[in-house]
Amino acid sequence: MPDEAADVVGDPWPVWPAGFAASPEDVRALLVLSGLRGLTPRRMLEVGVERGSAAATLAWVRAGKAGSENDRAFALTLDADEVAAAMRACGARFVPWNTPEYPEQLRAIHDPPAALFVAGAAFPDPTRAVAIVGARRCTALGREIAREVGRTLGLAGVTVVSGAARGIDAAAHEGALSADAPTIAVLGCGLDVAYPPDSRDLLRRVRSRGGTVLSEYPPGVPPDPWNFPARNRIVAGLCSATVVVEGGEGSGSMITAEHAMEFGRDVFAMPGAVTNPLAVVPLRLIREGATMIRGAEDLLEDLGLELVQEEIVQRVNLSDTERAVLGRLAGPTLPDRVASELRATVPEVVGVLMRLELRGFVRSVGGRYESTLKGRPQADARSSRSARGTPAGETRRTGMPARSSRLAAIDER
Amino acid sequence: MYGRVTGVTVVGVRGHLVTVESHVGRGLPSLTFTGQPGAAVQDARDRIRPAIESAKLEWPLRRVVVNLVPGNLRKEGPGLDLPVAMSVLAAMRQAPISKLPGWAFAGELSLEGSLVSTPGVLSVAIAAARAGLRGVVVPQPNAAEAALVDGLEVVGAPALAEVVGFFRGTWTPVPHPGSSDETQRSHAVDLSEIRGQAQARRALEVAAAGGHNILLIGSPGAGKTMLARRLPTILPTMSREEALEVTQLHSVAGLLEGGLVRERPFRSPHHTVSPAALLGGGSTHLRPGEVSLATHGVLFLDEFTEFRRDAVEGLRQPLEDGRVVVTRMAGTAEFPARFTLVAAANPCPCGYHGDTSRRCRCRDDRIGVYTAKLSGPLLDRVDIRLTVPRLTKQELLGQEPGEPSAPVRERVEEARARQRRRYVALGSFCNAQLPGPVARREARMSASAESLLAEAVDRHALTGRGFDRVLKVARTIADLAGSEHVEPDHVVEALAYRQTPSALEPEHAG
């Protein structure tokens, strides 16, 4: 869509001038410009187009013609060498707009960052990146879904892109890392700022597994709340598809998904019960046309990738009682209720639930019990589908990730 | 002129005999105490003369010295009013001095000469009986309490005049009604009042049967307090020894009304409680704290995370040893403190983390700080942790009233009897009291139960302590089922009571 629009009306969005960061002096200016807080990327783009180069833009700011008064004062005192030294100290490199390393997908968005601070490996194939976003304070189920989607994508050779927040972000990374797949973490603060504090360990592992950590902010920039919506456009912009797992009213994942739609990328959403406050965003997205997925295999199918099936869920081995109890768990359910429906005692039911929990079919949430992904009804269907041609039971198969129709379609654009 | 009677001072819960001797000699009219009188005894100086005069007896207009023996013990409490008065009257020969030996006196006097209810009378009577005395003279309201001690004559007198009259042979005490141990215990609350919450009710039963401490986590309105309040109703009926101990503690604290306490105590101190009030203490007079008043009953700490850290840390000794040692300037006292701890907490500061129908409004880092308070050395002593869901209206409707307390208590008593028989040689009474290694030896697990538990260790990454807790709870469940061995079913149920609720799981790094 945006491309068609561009054809018809000309160029609705300015792009960085070709020579914007051409000279070393421009790169130095860009290091300073990236640290300005009052000059939004969009405004900088406008000024950049007008002035033609980063050095000229910086001079413009220093003259007080653009950016805030603070920016002017800051731009006058900030030394590019200091920024560069701080950047090197946290093992990062500077990737301006016009360098080959700058991800191609990101160039296509409305207000691409003029430069990125990048640590870790070079970007993997940008056309094979999928964002997984969602609530920080997610449910156990949401975390499990994000993990599974992350892991499945990782196994299929797709790069998982997300923030570094707790909850869905972290679970998505963990899932992909568990499949030994590299991931990309996009921060809303400087690369040397660990936010949230417990992300430090996650980011270290992302980098040690061949992944990439990046930010448009220079080192030392704090995680200001307004950085995150801007960060979300990079997450969406880097990927050919965005998956929203859980998100409540006012969640940042809505922003990411809106960016993705705006950029003409695919949006997938994992639904939840209409009463679930964390299903608000996914359900709204589905109504707005996002593709509903029930799990990682739906996503792979839609992306045209082959599911790399690791192990077939052993639901077949459940006893009749266990099956009956599992069948009563429509959402988080009280053991009392299961007991009265099955005419059993509560200790009996609790015993069965614990056996199921031991094997990962069930988890307890706040005194109630719910089925895990492994215990959900469609698991049967999944095992029969993916075990095509092989006897049901443990099948280990390594599928070759095939080129996806949708991913290919994006490639062709 | 010299007189001497026996009084009792109470240190902690123990009564110590005190010889109160008086000398009435020449000099300006005065009353002097020697022999470490505490503040309350000093108080008596101005109280005793009006009391004696109100009783139509004569106060000597001479110099009176009262000495309290032994001199190395600080005497506390108003209970020494009566022995001091009797000692002076004996010195004046207004009371027949030959008849006073063999009796211990205790009681606070009012200015009109009447004896008012005095704390610690049961401890006085126990000390008197232990010393082989013939009887005790106590205020009438405390007579029933003193009569709980066997082999002791109890004179419950309404006033000082009657006490003197008793020894002169002009007054006979009304025989107080014999102790009525057999009266039915009737609790104000019953387990049947709890609708739904079957898993929590069952957890209470298991806790009662094994003497396990329990942590209830749930959103406001889930019914944590209601559940805790009903735990005493399903604990076994107290033995006479236990009841006596509880009565003695409540007597010392001045909380006793009437005779023997038969209901297991339920104490729920507010979370602002000071360490001294929780554990016992006081600057001059050492009083039992809430932990001791909860002895043989339930100590309920609602809003557990809000309690002062020093107060909570102080709970470790009583939980380990079943007693608490209080040391103050005034001396050292040891109080029994063997209780079942019920701690209750919200899952997060706002209370709705993990709730299925309301959204939590807490900042992530605050949840971390909060849940950190729900672990630690103290909670290692809590065998059963349970999340209590807040029931929706729909879930509450159509719930039949639950089982009443009485049949549950019967099952609990059977399970306790089984444990007592098994541990008779170990000096323990219930599974919760067993040290870890002993529990592992005594659990008597079937082979299949053992392999199941081993699997759970792998799955849930149970720590050593967590393992012991599951083992003990499984043993209790087996005792409830009347099973000689711990079977897999018992283990799986026990695993349900170790659930750290999903809300409290440490977040994955990142």
Image: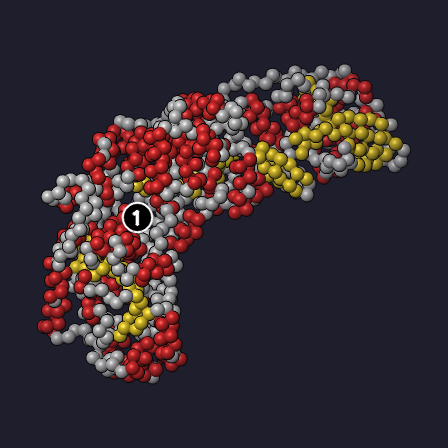
Screen quadrant of the C terminus of chain B: bottom left
> On screen, A254 above or below B311?
below
Quick check: can you spot residue B274?
A: yes
Whether residue B192 can be seen here: no
Q: Residue at the location (56% across, 44% down)?
A: B274
- Residue where numbered disc 1 is placed: A139
Residue A17 position by quadrant? bottom left
Question: In the rendered image of this protein, does residue B160 appear above or below residue A259?
Answer: above
- Measured as percent of width and height from the top left, residue A48 is found at 25, 79
| Nearest the eye: B223 or A131 | A131
Q: Position of residue A286 (x, y in %)?
A: 18, 53
Instruction: Pinpoint residue A220: horizontal percent, then vertical percent.
Output: 38, 69
Asked whether, in this view, residue B269 is left or right of residue A392, the answer is right
Number of callouts: 1
Q: Residue at x 49, y 43 (%)?
A: B377
Q: Amino acid at mark 1?
A: Thr
Which chain letter matches label 1? A
Q: Name the residue located 10 percent from the left edge and 69 percent from the top edge.
A: A4
